[in-house]
Every structure is written in structure tokens, then in C-alpha cells.
Image: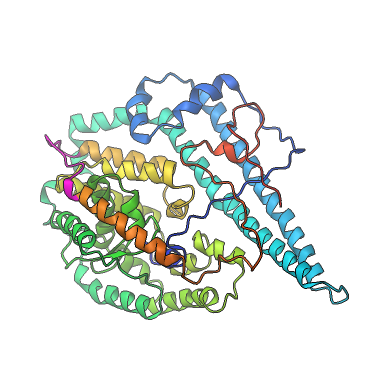
Amino acid sequence: MRSRTGRFLLALLSVGMVVPLAAWHDRNHKPSVPLTPAVFRPLQKDLQKHYLTLFKESPELEFSSYQIQQMHDYLDKAKSYCVGEYKNLAAKRKSHIEKLKAELHNKDAKLSRSKRRKLRCKIQKAELLRSEDLVLARHAIPIAYANKEAKLDLIQQWPSDLKTIKQELADGAYRHRRWGDVQDIGFRVIAPGQRKDIKTGQEAVRQMKESGLMPPPVRNKKVVDYVKSVAEKVAAHSDLHVPLHVTVLNSNEINAFSFPGGYIFVDRGLLNAADNEAELAGVIGHEIGHVVARHGHKLMERQTVAGIFYQGAQVAAMVLTGGIASIGTYYAIQYGFYGLSMALDLRLLGVSRQFELQADQLGIQYAWNSGYDPEGFIRFFDKMATDEGYVNGVGWFYDHPPFYLRMKDAMREIMFLPKKKRYIENTTAFMRMKKELVKVNARAKKKAKNRPSLHRHPQGCPAVHKVEYKAGEPIETLCHLPGGYTGKQHEHHP
């Protein structure tokens, strides 16, 4: 998971809220996306499988290069069509909004109070749905198709990559990889000067708190102590040479992030999403990897901490002071695609994709060295990309390395690590934490009902009906594609 500094403000605005995305289709529009049933049917099922399953099964699959290419072509055209449909829909909504506003502000028209209220309701509804259309078109749909493309690449490329990995294992070449001296973990210097980052991290935390951008911490001692115990265990088996500071934030976002100098933050939403302790350990290991490799320090060199937080505070003020921002802006910020997230995400200030691959490798090593199943990180990534990623975690993939490269490198590192007889996957302590988390979630949900928010309906306005994309469904369910392979169709009209 990537190290972020802005996502938790988004969580602060939306704790306890689940905002499904809308889908609406023009029944008279019949796009021409050529489908090849003989290709689509057998591959469709495989593209719904988890990465770890495909790693095991792909060497036995017998798809020709022609079939693979045909599916690549289909996915590319289907993505283009689906993105285009929602861009067009957003444009139609924009025109509709402008007409409604013109009607509302027409000084010559004598509108009754009831008529004005109805117009305001229609405007807010249209703005909400347009913002969701843009989230779909610009980010969610491309990410979903990128995940499909990665699995198709896995089916095609992994058998050959696996042979290379086995050859490296046989001839000992794997020992010469970057940071291959895993027997010396704890005595290695991945990036000199970790202690120099402590003040930078302290200053970042201070400014976040003073700017009001830091969500409140979780107060449940059992949950906090558990997370700290796992983090301290992983840190003790890592190359971290500075004190570890762990904070559990009362945020429903599925995320974790780190500041330079040993400051790790884990969102409550991530604890909800993790199915076992190995997954949590893998994510924490990844964040410790960012600290150890001094990624935050390297990126902060390009801009001062004060400058970064000033930009973020400007956007935050727009959202938090009086509802000046439109509902569309609120949703754009909430989903983390521009605005606040762009201003605060340190990794956008420099080359970050290589940093993610480095943190993946180190995090897997640290989880393994702590006795955890190193595949836990892949399982969590898979869950985010396939199950959770569409709504709650779609911003998690922003500016990340290509999915297949990331999964291949992760599996490669796992295969290079010396095998252990037993790995920790889950613990009774994790299950106890989950039970305590139910209480924390309930309190947060209750508190969120009374929290001021831009997600309000004018008095007398009906709630906006939205169709939620269900986890695990094919992305084609969002678009009316021809050929009979699209699953159920959703409709929503402005």
C-alpha cells in the first residue's frame, strides 16, 4: 500500500459513509464492441480469479497468443467504450445542470417557493450523479480494466517468467538481487541517515494536527495495543533503526501511510478489510519499507513540508468552511483523484513507482522474517484490486506501478526467500481485535450521523437513488455492452 499524506483528510470527511456509484444508460445507444465468444467465455472466468490462483494455474492453461491478443483487443475497446459512455453522460448532466441553474436564476420568472426547492433538489441530484460519472470515467473504470489486463498478462507471461525464476534459483543468481542478503536483515543499511528523518516526521505530524487534517485516533486500547504489537514485531525483524511510532486513525478509509522517521499510521478501514494477521503484517511491513528506504525524505527534498501542507489547507478550507464547495467537488475530493489528495500526496512530487516496488520487496522480507506468510501482502493487494478496490480503495492504486509487474516482483521475491516450515497466517489476538473493532465501528457510525457534511439533501428533497457496483462483479455490469456477456444491466436517469 502506498505511503500517503492526504488520504486521511478524505477519510475525515467520510467516516462511516458508503457512497455507491451511479450508473445510467441510453437505451437507444447501441455501441459496436466486437466480442469473440470463443475467446471471451473461457477467459472471462479466469480473469475473475485471484492472483495467487492464477500464479498456480497459468502454467497449465492453454490459450494461444492469438486468443490472448484478441482478449487484449476486447478489453481495450470495452474500456474505451465504457469510459466514453460515462464521459458523455457527464457532459449531458453538465448541460442539464446549466439549464436548471438558468431557470432557477431567471429574474423574470416568478417561481414559487415550492418550485425553487424542486429546482435546487434537481441541481444537487444532477451534480452528485455527474461527479460520480467522472469518478467512473477518469479512474474507477480504467483501474478495473487495468486489473483485468494484469491478470491477462499473468496468464500469458508468468509461465515464461517462472522458468527464469527457477533458473535463477538453480544457479544461485537470485542471491545477487538487490537486497538479497536477507540473512542480515537488521544489520543492513538500505539508505543511510534514517535518524535525520525524525525531525522531519515530527514536523509533518505537527502540521497535520495544527491544520486540522489529522483524523482523531482510535481510543479503544485493545485495538491500538494489538496493532502496535504487530507493528513492533515486524519492525524488530526489519532494517528500521529509529523508534517506531504507530497511530491507529478513526478513519473508514482502507489505507495506511508513513512519514519519515518511523511514523506509521493505520486507518480503521484497513483493519476492517484485513482478513488475517499476515495481511496486516504485510501492509505494515510495506510502510516500514518506505521509512527504511527514506522515500518520504527523498520526495520532500523537492518541496518544503510547509508548502505541501499549505496547499492542502487551502483545499480543506474550501470544503470545511460553510459548504462553499459544490457537491461535485466534495465527491471528487472524497475519492482522492485531484484537489486535496494531489496537493498532499508526497509521492506525487517525484518518481514514486520505483519506490512502491522497493517497499513491496522490503515489506515482504520483513513479514517473512517475522514469521508471517509472505503471501499475505499479495492477498491484500488482490482484495483491494478485485473486491474492495472499486469504491473504497480505488484511489489506493493512483500512480502505482503496473499491476502485473508488481505482482510478479512480489511472487518472485517470495520464491527467493528461504522456505520456513510454518508461517503465521492468523492469530487469536487478531480475532479478538476484530471483535473490539465492531464496537469501534458502531460508535464511529453513530457519531458520523451528526457530523456536519456536504452530503446533505435540501429540506424536502428525496434521497438520490444510486446503483452500487457490487464487489466481485465484472466491470461490464456498469456498461451496456452487446453480446450477452455483460451480466445484469443497471439503469439510472437524470
Residue 9 sits in quarter: bottom left
The image position of residue 306, as x and y in percent, is 40, 79
Looking at the image, is 92 positioned above or below residue 37? below
Q: Nearer the viewer, residue 114 or 207?
A: 114
Residue plotted at (41% across, 79% down): 211
Is residue 181 shown to the viewer in this render?
no
- Judged by its main secondary structure, the magenta piece is loop
In front here: 470 or 308?
470
Write the residue at 30% across / 31% down. Answer: 164
Q: Magenta segment: does it hold 163?
A: no
**Residue 128 picture location, percent across and down:** 62, 59
Residue at 36% over, 20% down: 60
Q: Is residue 327 left or right of residue 445?
A: right
List x then y, in percent, for residue 305.
Answer: 38, 76
**In the image, 139: left or right of 91?**
left
Which range is magenta?
Answer: 417-429
Q: Position of residue 372 (x, y in %)?
A: 18, 44
